[in-house]
Image (spheres, rainbow, N blue to C red):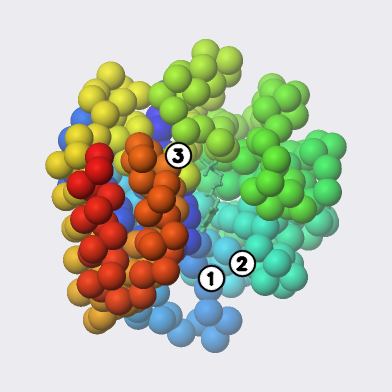
């Protein structure tokens, strides 16, 4: 079974991928890191800073899979060609993002509204590109019943792997992933299938593998941000030690500070990580508010010192 890390904007960026690999990559590396989505520029002029996010795509070691968010198939096909020049092989298409600003433009999960448009998009992409293209999808917009028609479209194309996050667009991240609906559709998928959604423990990961032995992969997102050693534990390794976690968060903070040029921007990025990390620190709930209120580097560093002092 392949384990993958989910693309998460604001969390699984290049800096995080490098730091995660450094601290938890030896025995707990994912088979692939999926990078957060990039949108192709309509004027076809690449933005250097955005493309630099994929600098690790051609690295030796764990492959990085870029993700493309688009609704124009020709433009997406061109962009996939550009992205491939950075050294990656697989490229992933995003039909899952539920954010209102994305779906209002008909992108992300908004692509699931109209299977005919989805078909035209995929036709344009697969006519233009060579090499592996995977898809990450939700089950529909309003109801899981929509997935029958959506899957009929996917089944017409040589999608190298279909990652299904069994929620619908209108759910955002509320409620639970609909594993019953996932199970209903799995046998009809004509390509390798990866499951994604609500996996936060090694036991849950193994339970899913036992329930769906035909899966090609399982993708974890928030669970791995909360416990960066989750995949190592799932492969029989030890949990993260206090020293490892300290090294991991300090490396992240230092690298974000260097990249953004000032600690306050790094603090804001680190808070996104701590949102998932903090519940794993026993007795640290009282520090949630001070952490949330921290603006300056010194404020953040003080609270993080207190969090680790209590662990
Ligand atoms: C903050 C945040 C950012 C995300 N960014 C992306 C993204 O760029 N591309 C994508 O396909 N999914 C994105 N997702 C969805 C995740 O990849 C994943 O499908 C979702 O979190 C469910 O998996 P999990 O329960 O293991 O976290 C994002 C989710 C969150 C919470």
* Residue at figure coordinates x 47%, y 33% from the top left: 200
Residue at (82% x, 56% y) in the render: 114
Element under disc 2: loop
Residue for badge 3:
223
**Distance from Cα at disc 2 to Cα at disc 1:** 6 Å
x, y (%) of residue 276? 43, 48
Above or below, 306 relative to 30: below
Q: Are marks 3 and 1 in contact (CB under 8 Å)?
A: no
Residue 146, quarter of picture:
top right
Whether label 2 touches label 3, CB < 8 Å: no
Q: Nearer the viewer, residue 219 or 55?
A: 219
Q: What quarter of the picture does the N terminus occupy?
A: top left
* Label 2 crowd bin: few (<14), some (14–19), many (20+), radius 10 Å: many
Q: Dot 3 lies on which element?
A: helix
Q: Give the CA separation, mark 3 to mark 1.
A: 26 Å
Q: Relative to residue 106, is residue 302 drawn left or right?
A: left
Q: Which of marks 3 and 1 is in front?
A: 3
Q: Which of 285 and 167 is in front in this view?
A: 285
Whether residue 51 is visible, yes or no, is no
Residue under pointer 1? 39
In the rendering, at what x and y percent does residue 80 appear?
Answer: 48, 63
Image side of residue 89 versus residue 113, left or right: left
Q: Mark 2 points at which residue?
A: 70
- Disc 3 C-beta below 8 A from ligand 1: yes
Quarter in which the C terminus is drawn: top left
Task: Give the spatial CA distance, label 2 vs label 3.
Answer: 27 Å
Q: Which of marks 2 and 3 is nearer the N terminus?
A: 2
Q: Which residue is drawn at 25% across and 53% down?
A: 306
Task: Decide if residue 229 is in sight here.
Answer: yes
């Amino acid at each position: 079974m392949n384990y993958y890390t989910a693309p998460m904007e604001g969390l699984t960026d290049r800096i995080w991928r490098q730091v995660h690999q450094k601290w938890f990559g030896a025995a707990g590396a994912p088979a692939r890191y999926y990078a957060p989505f990039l949108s192709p520029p309509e004027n076809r002029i690449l933005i250097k800073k955005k493309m630099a996010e994929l600098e690790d795509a051609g690295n030796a070691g764990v492959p990085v899979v870029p993700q493309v968010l688009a609704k124009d198939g020709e433009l997406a096909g061109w962009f996939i060609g550009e992205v491939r020049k950075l050294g990656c092989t697989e490229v992933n298409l995003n039909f899952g993002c539920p954010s209102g600003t994305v779906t209002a433009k008909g992108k992300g999960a908004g692509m699931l509204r109209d299977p005919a448009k989805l078909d035209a998009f995929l036709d344009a992409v697969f006519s233009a590109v060579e090499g592996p293209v995977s898809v990450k999808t939700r089950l529909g917009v309003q109801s899981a019943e929509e997935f029958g028609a959506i899957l009929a479209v996917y089944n017409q194309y040589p999608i190298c792997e279909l990652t299904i996050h069994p929620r619908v667009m209108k759910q955002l991240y509320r409620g639970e992933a609909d594993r019953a609906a996932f199970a209903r559709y799995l046998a009809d998928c004509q390509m390798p299938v990866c499951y994604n959604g609500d996996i936060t423990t090694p036991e849950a990961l193994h339970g899913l593998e036992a329930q769906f032995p035909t899966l090609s992969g399982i993708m974890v997102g928030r669970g791995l941000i909360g416990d960066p050693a989750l995949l190592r534990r799932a492969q029989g390794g030890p949990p993260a030690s206090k020293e490892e976690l300290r090294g991991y968060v300090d490396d992240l903070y230092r690298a974000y500070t260097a990249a953004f040029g000032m600690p306050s921007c790094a603090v804001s990025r680190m808070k996104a990580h701590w949102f998932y990390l903090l519940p794993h620190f026993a007795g640290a709930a009282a520090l949630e508010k001070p952490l949330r209120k921290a603006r300056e580097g010194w404020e953040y560093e003080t609270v993080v010192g207190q969090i680790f002092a209590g662990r």
